[in-house]
């Protein structure tokens, strides 16, 4: 198992239950090329220095309610395949999260 791929953010304990999916379903993505992205609430970000190990620290830049923001973050692969981590907005609190592997299904 690795961090690579898309994880559906299923819990953010420091926010109201419906905040993470405010604009679209919350997720975090690591692409294996040292990059990725995430979305939760009104925050979107591009990840830099992501990785393919079992844990990674990263920096990011993006927007929070259309204001430019940046910060750091981390995530760690759990034994059950889920991810635990945090996105830290510079000068603000951590946004802790739990995510599960996002699998898509198609119907014909």
Image (cartoon, grey):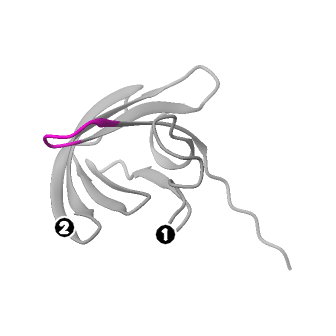
* Residue situated in front as seen by the camera: 33 or 35: 35
Outermost front residue: 16
User: Residue 69: percent from the left, percent from the top?
Assistant: 17, 57
> Is residue 51 in view from this perspective?
no
Residue in the picture at 28% in, 42% down? 50
Residue in the picture at 45% in, 36% down? 14
User: Residue 33: percent from the left, percent from the top?
Assistant: 29, 51
> Is residue 29 in view from this perspective?
yes
User: Residue 92: percent from the left, percent from the top?
Assistant: 20, 40
* Residue situated in front as seen by the camera: 52 or 42: 42
Against 21, residue 87 (above or below) is: above
Residue in the picture at 44% in, 50% down? 28
* Residue situated in front as seen by the camera: 75 or 49: 75
Against 4, residue 104 (above or below) is: below
In contact (CB < 8 Å): disc 2 and disc 1:
no
User: Residue 48: percent from the left, percent from the top?
Assistant: 21, 49
Residue 90: numbered disc? none
Outermost top residue: 79
Residue in the picture at 34% in, 59% down? 43
Outermost right residue: 108
Against 38, residue 71 (above or below) is: above
| Mark 2: secondary structure | strand
Crowding at dot 1, Cα within 10 Å, few <14 / some 14-19 / many 20+, comes out as few
In magenta segment, residue 41: no
- Give the mark nearer the N terminus: 2 vs 1: 1
Q: Label 2 belongs to which residue?
A: 67
Q: Give, as a single range, the part of the protein colored magenta.
A: 89-94
Q: Label 1 belongs to which residue?
A: 23
């Amino acid at each position: 198992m690795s961090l690579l791929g898309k994880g559906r953010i299923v819990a953010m304990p420091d926010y109201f239950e419906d905040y993470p999916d405010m604009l679209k379903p919350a997720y975090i993505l690591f692409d294996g090329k040292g990059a990725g992205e995430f979305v939760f609430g009104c925050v979107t970000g591009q990840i830099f220095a992501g990785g393919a190990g079992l844990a990674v620290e990263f920096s990011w830049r993006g927007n929070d309610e259309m204001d430019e923001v940046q910060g750091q973050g981390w995530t760690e692969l759990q034994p059950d395949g889920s991810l635990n981590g945090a996105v830290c907005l510079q000068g603000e609190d951590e946004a802790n999260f739990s995510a599960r592997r996002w699998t898509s299904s198609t119907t014909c």
